[in-house]
Image (cartoon, rainbow, N blue to C red):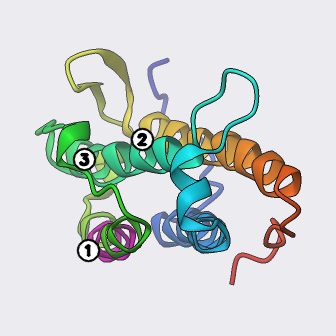
Amino acid sequence: MPQTGNEASVLTPQALLEHWQGHRRVTRRMIEAFPEDKLFSFSVGSMRPFSKMVQEFLMMAEPLARGVATGEWVAIEERDLPNTKAGLLALWDKTTTALNSILGAMPIDRYSRVDKAFGKWEGRGIDQILYAIDNEIHHRGQGYVYLRALGIEPPAFYDRS
C-alpha cells in the first residue's frame, strides 16, 4: 500500500531491534536447554528437529536484515551452517552482533522501501523484518513442545532479558 505521509510510527527502529533481540535471547536459551543429541534428532509428528528450525532462523536473520538495509540479497546455504550445538550458538551470537550493526545503521527509508527478498518475496522492509520475527516465534513454539515432551522445563517465553 502506498504511503500517504500520514502513517503513525509505533516503534522506533531501535525499539524494533530490541524487540527482535529480546525474542532472539529467548530462542538462544531454548537452544541451550536442548541436550545436544535431542537438538539434532528429536521431533514430534512430522515436524523437523529444533536444530533445523534454528538453522532456518540463521539463514534468514542476517541475510534478510542486510538485504533490507542494502538491497543486496545474499542467501546463506544450509550446507554452510554448523551442525553442533556449540557451532549454532557461536553463529547465533555472531548474528546477534551483526543485526545490531546492520539495523543500528540502516537508513529509516529502508523500512518502507519495497524490495523482493532473495528475488522471491516482495514487500516493504518492515514487513520482511516482521516476518523473520514471526517465523522465529512460531517455530520456537514448536521447540517448547519438544522440550516439554522431553521432560525439560523450557525458558519463560515472556522473559526477554
Judge whether 14 appears above or below 58 on screen: below
The answer to whether the residues at label 1 and label 3 have Cβ atoms under 8 Å apart is: no
The residue drawn where x is 18% and y is 37% is 75
Between 157 and 80, the one lying in front of the other is: 80
Answer with the quarter of the image where residue 10 lies: bottom right
Depth order, front residue of 25/21: 25
Main SS of the magenta part reads: helix
Magenta extent: 92-100
Q: Mark 1 or 3 closer to N-term? A: 3
Using the image, determine if residue 131 lies above or below residue 87: above
Q: Tell which circle, 1 or 2, labels the residue nearer the N-terminal end.
A: 2
Q: Label 3 to label 2, Cα distance in Å?
A: 11 Å
Question: In the displayed structure, does residue 85 sit left or right of residue 77?
Answer: right
Residue placed under numbered mark 2 in the picture: 56
| Spatial separation of the CA atoms under disc 1 and disc 3 | 13 Å
Look at 49% across and 35% down and name the residue there. 127
Residue situated furthest front in the rendering = 37
Give how far across and how far down residue 65 sits, in percent. Answer: 31, 51
Residue tagged by mark 3?
63
Residue type at the position of mark 2:
Glu
Say which residue label 1 marks.
101
